[in-house]
Image (spheres, rainbow, N blue to C red):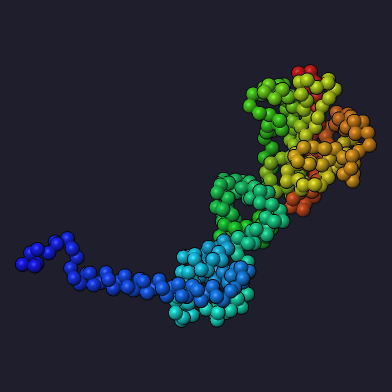
């Protein structure tokens, strides 16, 4: 009679006992884990020591993540890594290191992680120039530039490096042996926005009139580079003036690819030398030591007159990569464009 009145959806007695047993085991496991975690935390290892331990686990092939992970108390993936190590050495796989296990790992002479080696490279050269170089070279060699980690892996495979998608100094030096071709398509000027008109074009210079910004601009890109710039983009020089400027007023903007900040570039025009800096992205003509030049207006007028008389000019500068680069420009057609610049603006 009791069987007929029992809830047909209720689990049988044996299943109830299994559920209760599992709950008790889970509770004991959680309590044990709390004790093991507390024992680990009492060891008091510093952050630097934890980083060394993680490098050792990564070096031993147990930790897959190439980014630094040092939270050995709560990161579930790291607790699993520690369990794998403990099983490998025949210890109880608690997921939390004992002092003996931690000291053993600290004794491993493990190298920096791939992400750490990349960070050191970025600290030296900057992330944008380095990754920009790989994007340009990836586009040239494989027809791809994104994601950059895929490009890096392609080159790691090419040079027999560990394929992890992180740039090392060794890989960077290796890929620098591949000549990077500069793309010389004439690009946009420095001060164009949206509403601009292209005016008659000379051989090496382009001229635009930007109606929105009320600026006219004559622009040219470099025709040759000697030295490693780390980019497929050419350097450029722009002469510009506003609609309401005095007739003979013209400003110059110089953009050198991967120009090292706070360094002085040297322009050689018609046998004379001029010096340029780029504070906050703007072009400023200076003396050789970086100070304000004597008679700056006369100095600038001599520069423009020299550019009009010469067939070309050169600029020498230091890149963020520590290389010395000389970029060459053509001055052919500048006279025509400068006259048009003053006339239409």
Q: Residue at horizontal 9%, vertical 63%?
A: 5
Q: Residue at horizontal 85%, vertical 22%?
A: 248
Q: Residue at horizontal 82%, vertical 37%?
A: 284
Give the answer, above or below, for where 110 lies relative to 314: below
For the N terminus, the image quarter is: bottom left
Towards the viewer: 101 or 226: 101
Residue 204 shows in this picture = no
Q: Where is residue 93 in the image (x, y as percent from the top left)?
A: 44, 76
Give the answer, above or below, for where 12 lies relative to 305: below
Q: How many marks?
A: 0
Residue 283 shows in this picture = yes
Which residue appears farthest toward the top when viewing the image? 343
Which residue appears farthest toward the right when viewing the image? 294
Which residue appears farthest toward the left when viewing the image? 1
Q: Position of residue 243 (x, y in %)?
A: 76, 20
Give the answer, above or below, for where 133 lies relative to 268: below
Q: Position of residue 324 (x, y in %)?
A: 80, 50
Give the answer, above or below, for where 127 lies relative to 28: above
The answer to whether residue 133 is left or right of residue 74 is right
For the C terminus, the image quarter is: top right
Name which quarter of the figure residue 205 lies in: top right
The answer to whether residue 234 is left or right of residue 151 is right
Name which quarter of the figure residue 344 lies in: top right
Q: Residue at horizontal 74%, vertical 52%?
A: 321
Q: Where is residue 29 in the image (x, y as percent from the top left)?
A: 39, 73
The answer to whether residue 292 is left or right of residue 210 is right
The answer to whether residue 12 is left or right of residue 291 is left
Towards the viewer: 54 or 285: 54
């Amino acid at each position: 009679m009791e069987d007929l009145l029992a809830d047909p959806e209720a689990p049988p007695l044996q299943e109830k006992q299994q559920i209760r047993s599992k709950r008790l085991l889970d509770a004991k496991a959680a309590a044990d884990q709390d004790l093991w975690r507390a024992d680990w935390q009492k060891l008091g290892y510093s952050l630097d020591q934890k980083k060394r331990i993680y490098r050792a686990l990564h070096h031993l092939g147990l930790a897959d993540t190439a980014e630094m992970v040092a939270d050995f108390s709560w990161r579930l993936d790291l607790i699993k890594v520690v369990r794998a190590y403990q099983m490998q050495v025949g210890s109880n796989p608690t997921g939390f290191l004992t002092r003996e296990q931690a000291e053993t790992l600290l004794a491993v002479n493990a190298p920096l992680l791939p992400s750490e080696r990349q960070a050191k490279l970025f600290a030296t050269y900057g992330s944008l120039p380095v990754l920009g170089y790989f994007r340009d070279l990836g586009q040239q060699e494989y027809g791809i530039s994104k994601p950059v980690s895929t490009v890096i892996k392609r080159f790691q495979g090419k040079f027999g490096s560990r394929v992890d998608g992180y740039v090392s100094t060794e890989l960077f030096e290796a890929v620098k042996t591949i000549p990077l071709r500069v793309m010389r398509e004439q690009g946009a000027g420095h001060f164009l926005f949206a509403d601009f008109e292209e005016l008659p074009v000379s051989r090496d210079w382009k001229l635009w009139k930007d109606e929105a910004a009320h600026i006219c601009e004559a622009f040219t890109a470099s025709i040759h580079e000697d030295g490693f710039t780390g980019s497929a983009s050419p350097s450029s020089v722009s002469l510009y003036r506003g609609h309401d400027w005095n007739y003979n007023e013209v400003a110059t903007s110089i953009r050198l690819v991967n120009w090292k900040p706070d360094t002085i570039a040297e322009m050689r025009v018609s046998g004379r030398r001029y010096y340029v800096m780029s504070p906050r992205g703007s072009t400023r003509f200076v003396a050789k030591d970086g100070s304000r030049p004597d008679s700056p207006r006369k100095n600038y007028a001599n520069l423009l007159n020299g550019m009009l008389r010469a067939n070309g000019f050169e600029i020498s500068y230091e890149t963020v990569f520590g290389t010395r680069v000389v970029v060459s420009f053509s001055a052919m057609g500048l006279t025509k464009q400068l006259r048009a610049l003053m006339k239409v603006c």
